[in-house]
C-alpha cells in the first residue's frame, strides 16, 4: 500500500473513534491537515467526531482497537481536548464500527457528541458482565413441568350455601367441574361453570358421586319468618290479645260478591271495575257494634284462582256467596276446595233472594251434594239469606261473622314486631312502589325497617283503606305502605328488621336464590334428547309474551291463565319471557324485538318513547282490561301458530270401461261417472286397481265425444287423460278429490 497521503474529499469521517489511516495497517495519514494532530480546532474528542473534514483513509474502519474509555468519561471530555487524543486514540476506541463505506453527514459538535454517546453505548452493550450472562442463562432455561396436584376431597359431609355456582361446588367438593356438568347434562340440565344452582340441585348431583352434603344457614337468616302460623305459636300466651277477624268473600262470577261488600261498606266499588269484574284483591275494614271486621274481596273469574287461594290462606273466615237464582257453579266448587284446603270456617250467604226466581232450598241441596251441609240440614256450616242490592239481612250476616270469630278465639300479640302478608303491590308513578299489607301479628310503625320477600325498605308513610294517614297499624289491619325499594310479590311475608343493611343483604341473597331456582326450573323442564327430538320433528312451537300490568296480582292471574292454556294442549306453548308492574318501557320493546315476542298490557300503557320505538320496528302491543278478552285472543294467537290442516274432500267416482291410444302415445280412458262429478281443473285423481292406489295425479284433458267440457256429472260417460300416466287399464276405478286448507284450532 502506498504511503502517499490521500486528498481530503470533504466527506465526513466514518464514525467516532475510527482510524483515519489506511485500513491495511491502521497507520495514521499525517499529510492531511485534518488528521487529528491536535491543531485542528474542529477535531472531535473520543466522544464524538468533528464537524470538519476528516480523511477516511481507505474508507475501511479500523477493527483492532478497543474502547478503553468509560462512557461517562467520554461524555465529559470537552471538545478542546480532541487534539490531545489524536486519530490513533480514536482508532483504538472503535468497538462497534458502522457498515463498510457508510457515510453520515456532519451535524456539528452537538450532533457529534450525540453520535459518540450512542456508539459508546453500543460498545458497552457488546460486553456482558458475568451476572448478566448468568441471568440470561437462567432465563433461557426451560421451565420444569409442574407436578399435577392430587384432588383432595373433604371427609364427612360437605357444607354448602343455599346458592352457589358450579365452580364453587367443584371447589368445595373436590370434584371436577367438567364431571359435574356431565352429571347435570345427564339429568337434563344444560349449564356452564358460572351457572348458579340451589342447594337442592347440588345435593342431588353430589348424591350421584356419593358425597354427603349439608346446607349452611347464615346467621342473619336464622330469625327470618317463613311461616306466620309458627310466629303466632311462639308468642307468649299472656301477651296475646283479641283481634278483629279477617273475612274473605268468595264465589262464582256475577253472584254479587262485590255488591255484598259494597252494601257492607256503603261504597261503590263495582262501578269502577271494567266489565263489572273485580280485577284486584281489595282489603277493607268496617266497624260493627264497636268491633272491627276486615274484608278481603277476591276476584270471581276463574283465571284468578291463585289470588283466591292466597285470600284463603290469610283469612280467618270465608263467606261463600251463592246466587239464589243461579245455583252452584264450577267456580263455587273451586272456592269450596280452597276453603277446605285452608282449613278455615265458612259461612254460606245465599244472595239475590229478592228475585222472583230465587230458590234457596235448591241451593242448600246442591251444596249438600258436594259435601257442604248447612246447619238447617244438620251440618255445621251457617247459612244466611241476604240481598246485596236491597240490603236485606246485612246485619244478620255481620252478626254471624262476629259469632264465628268468637268461637275461633282469634288472638295476636300487638307488642311484638310486626309480621304480615302482602295482599297487593303496584308501582305508582308519583309514590314509587306501593304495597297493601295485612298485619297479622305485632304492630307496624312509621320508620320501621322491613324485609318483604326479596325487597327491603323503610316505612315512610301508611294509609288506611279510606286514605287516612296512619302512624301505626295493629293486628288484622290492612294498610297501604310506601317506602319499599322495589315491588314485592303478592303473598310475600313482611317482617320488621332491626337493621336496614341486614335487611338489604337478606333481600339480595333471596333474589339470587330465586333467580337460581328459576333458572334451574327452566333447565329441568325437558332433557336435551327430548328437546332435540321435538325440534327435529317440528313439534316445538312457542309464543313469546312480555306481560306488563298495573298490579302484581293481575300478572299472577294472567300467568295462571297461560299455564292452564299450555296444559290443555301441547301443540303450541306460550312462554312468558318477562313480566313486570308499571308502564311499558322502551326496554320492553327492545326485548320484544330481540325475542320476537308480543307485548301484553293489562291496564298498562306504553310511554311515548316506547310507543314510537314499537311503531318504528313493528312490535305488536296489545291492551286489555278484561281477562276473558285476553284469554280469547291468546287462544287465537296460539291457534294461528299451528300449521293449517289439509282436508281431503272426495267429489266423485268413475270406472274405466275402455282405453284408446293417441298418436302422441297418450292413453285416453273412456270412463263412466258412477257418483259425484268430474271437474277438469281443481281436482286430483287416484287410479285404483283392485282397491290399491297405483297412481295419484291430475287430469290433463276431459272431453265428451269431441268437445272439451269443464265437468261431467254422475250417469254420463266421458274421456279423460291422466297426466303422466299411460298404464291405465279397463276395470280400474278412479277417485276424484280436492284438498281444502282448514285453519287450526285449539
Image (tube, helix red, strand yellow):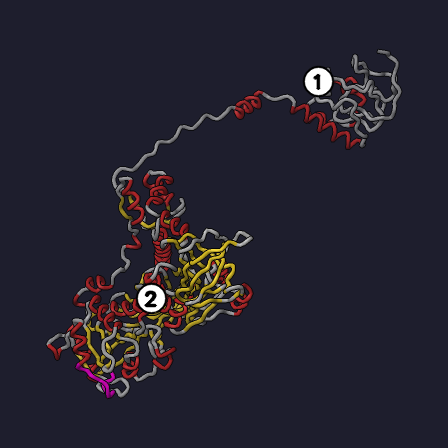
In this picture, residue 210 sits left or right of residue 383: right
Comparing 90 with 72, the one in front is: 90
Q: What percent of the width, then of the height, locates residue 105?
A: 81, 30
Residue 639 visible in the current orientation: no
Element carrying mark 1: loop
Q: Residue at x 51, y 59 (%)?
A: 700
Q: Which residues are magenta?
A: 351-361
The residue labelled by disc 2 is 490
Q: What percent of the width, then of the height, locates residue 73?
A: 70, 25
Question: Magenta: predominant secondary structure element?
Answer: loop
Q: Residue furthest left?
A: 378
- How packed mark 2 is, by other alpha carbons closer than 10 Å (few <14, some 14-19, many 20 or more), is many
Q: Which mark is residue 344?
A: none
Q: Quadrant of the N terminus?
A: top right
Task: Please say whether residue 551 is one of the residues in the magenta stretch.
Answer: no
Q: Residue at x 34, y 80 (%)?
A: 270
- How packed mark 1 is, by other alpha carbons closer than 10 Å (few <14, some 14-19, many 20 or more), is some
In this picture, residue 397 sits left or right of residue 179: left
360 versus 682 height, above or below:
below
Q: Quadrant of the C terminus?
A: bottom left
Comparing 584 with 629, the one in front is: 629
Q: Earlier in the sequence, mark 1 or mark 2?
A: 1
Residue 123 visible in the current orientation: yes
The residue labelled by disc 1 is 66
The answer to whether marks 1 and 2 mark residues whose Cβ atoms lie closer than 8 Å is: no
Amino acid at each position: 500500500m502506498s504511503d502517499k497521503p490521500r486528498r481530503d474529499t470533504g466527506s465526513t469521517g466514518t464514525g467516532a473513534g475510527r482510524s483515519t489511516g489506511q485500513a491495511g495497517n491502521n497507520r495514521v495519514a499525517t499529510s492531511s491537515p485534518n488528521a487529528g494532530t491536535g491543531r485542528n480546532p474542529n477535531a472531535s474528542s473520543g466522544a464524538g467526531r468533528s464537524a470538519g473534514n476528516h480523511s477516511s483513509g481507505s474508507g475501511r474502519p479500523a477493527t483492532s482497537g478497543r474502547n478503553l474509555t468509560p462512557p461517562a468519561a467520554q461524555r465529559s471530555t470537552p471538545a478542546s481536548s480532541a487534539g490531545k487524543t489524536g486519530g490513533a486514540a480514536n482508532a483504538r476506541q472503535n468497538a462497534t464500527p458502522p457498515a463498510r463505506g457508510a457515510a453520515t453527514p456532519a451535524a456539528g459538535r452537538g450532533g457529534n457528541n450525540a453520535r459518540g454517546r450512542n456508539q459508546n453505548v453500543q460498545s458497552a452493550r457488546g460486553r456482558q458482565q458475568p451476572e448478566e450472562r448468568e441471568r440470561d442463562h437462567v432465563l433461557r432455561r426451560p421451565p420444569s413441568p409442574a407436578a399435577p396436584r392430587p384432588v383432595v376431597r373433604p371427609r364427612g359431609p360437605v357444607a354448602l350455601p343455599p346458592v352457589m355456582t358450579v365452580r364453587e361446588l367443584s371447589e368445595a367438593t373436590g370434584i371436577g367441574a367438567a364431571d359435574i356438568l356431565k352429571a347435570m347434562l345427564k339429568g337434563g340440565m344444560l349449564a356452564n361453570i358460572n351457572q348458579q344452582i340451589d342447594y337442592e340441585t347440588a345435593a342431588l348431583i353430589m348424591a350421584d358421586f356419593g358425597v354427603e352434603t349439608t346446607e349452611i344457614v347464615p346467621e342473619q337468616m336464622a330469625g327470618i319468618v317463613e311461616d306466620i302460623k309458627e310466629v303466632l305459636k311462639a308468642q307468649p300466651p299472656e301477651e296475646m290479645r283479641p283481634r278483629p277477624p279477617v273475612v274473605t268473600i268468595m264465589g262464582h262470577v256475577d253472584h254479587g260478591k262485590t255488591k255484598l261488600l259494597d252494601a257492607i261498606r256503603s261504597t261503590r266499588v263495582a262501578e269502577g271495575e271494567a266489565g263489572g269484574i273485580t280485577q284486584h284483591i281489595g282489603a277493607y275494614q268496617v266497624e260493627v257494634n264497636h268491633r272491627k271486621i276486615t274484608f278481603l274481596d277476591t276476584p270471581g273469574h276463574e283465571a284468578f284462582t291463585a289470588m283466591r287461594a292466597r285470600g284463603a290462606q290469610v283469612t280467618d273466615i270465608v263467606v261463600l256467596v251463592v246466587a239464589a237464582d243461579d245455583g252452584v257453579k264450577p267456580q263455587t266448587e273451586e272456592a269450596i276446595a280452597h276453603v277446605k284446603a285452608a282449613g278455615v270456617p265458612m259461612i254460606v250467604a245465599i244472595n239475590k233472594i229478592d228475585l222472583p226466581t230465587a230458590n234457596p232450598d235448591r241451593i242448600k241441596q246442591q251444596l249438600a251434594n258436594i259435601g257442604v251441609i248447612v246447619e238447617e240440614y244438620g251440618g255445621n256450616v251457617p247459612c244466611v239469606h241476604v240481598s246485596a242490592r236491597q240490603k236485606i239481612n246485612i246485619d244478620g250476616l255481620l252478626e254471624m261473622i262476629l259469632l264465628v270469630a268468637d268461637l275461633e278465639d282469634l288472638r295476636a300479640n300487638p307488642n311484638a314486631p310486626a309480621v304480615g302478608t302482602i295482599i297487593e303491590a303496584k308501582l305508582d308513578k308519583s309514590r314509587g312502589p306501593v304495597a297493601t299489607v295485612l298485619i297479622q301479628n305485632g304492630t307496624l310503625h312509621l320508620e320501621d325497617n322491613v324485609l318483604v320477600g326479596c325487597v327491603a325498605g323503610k316505612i315512610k308513610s301508611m294509609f288506611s283503606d279510606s286514605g287516612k294517614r296512619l302512624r301505626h297499624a295493629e293486628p288484622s289491619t290492612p294498610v297501604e305502605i310506601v317506602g319499599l325499594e322495589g315491588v314485592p310479590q303478592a303473598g310475600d311475608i313482611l317482617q320488621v328488621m332491626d337493621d336496614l343493611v341486614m335487611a338489604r343483604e337478606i333481600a339480595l341473597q333471596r333474589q339470587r336464590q330465586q333467580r337460581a331456582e328459576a333458572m334451574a326450573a327452566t333447565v329441568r323442564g325437558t332433557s336435551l334428547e327430548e328437546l332435540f327430538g321435538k325440534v327435529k320433528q317440528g313439534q316445538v312451537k312457542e309464543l313469546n309474551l312480555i306481560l306488563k300490568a298495573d298490579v302484581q296480582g293481575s300478572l299472577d292471574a294472567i300467568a295462571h291463565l297461560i299455564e292452564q292454556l299450555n296444559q290443555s294442549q301441547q301443540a303450541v306453548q306460550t312462554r312468558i319471557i318477562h313480566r313486570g308492574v308499571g308502564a311499558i318501557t322502551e326496554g320492553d320493546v327492545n326485548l320484544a324485538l330481540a325475542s320476537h315476542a308480543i307485548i301484553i298490557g293489562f291496564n298498562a300503557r306504553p310511554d311515548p318513547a316506547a310507543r314510537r320505538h314499537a311503531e318504528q320496528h313493528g312490535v305488536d302491543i296489545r291492551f286489555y282490561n278484561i281477562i276473558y278478552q285476553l284469554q280469547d285472543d291468546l287462544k287465537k294467537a296460539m291457534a294461528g301458530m299451528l300449521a293449517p290442516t289439509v282436508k281431503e274432500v272426495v267429489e266423485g267416482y268413475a270406472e274405466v270401461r275402455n282405453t284408446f291410444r293417441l298418436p302422441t302415445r297418450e292413453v285416453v280412458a273412456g270412463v263412466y261417472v258412477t257418483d259425484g262429478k268430474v271437474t277438469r281443473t281443481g281436482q286430483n285423481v287416484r287410479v285404483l286397481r283392485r282397491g290399491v292406489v297405483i297412481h295419484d295425479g291430475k287430469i290433463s284433458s276431459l272431453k265428451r265425444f269431441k268437445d272439451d267440457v269443464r265437468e261431467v256429472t254422475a250417469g254420463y260417460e266421458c274421456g279423460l287423460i291422466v297426466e303422466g300416466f299411460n298404464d291405465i287399464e279397463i276395470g280400474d276405478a278412479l277417485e276424484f278429490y280436492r284438498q281444502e286448507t282448514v285453519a287450526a284450532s285449539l
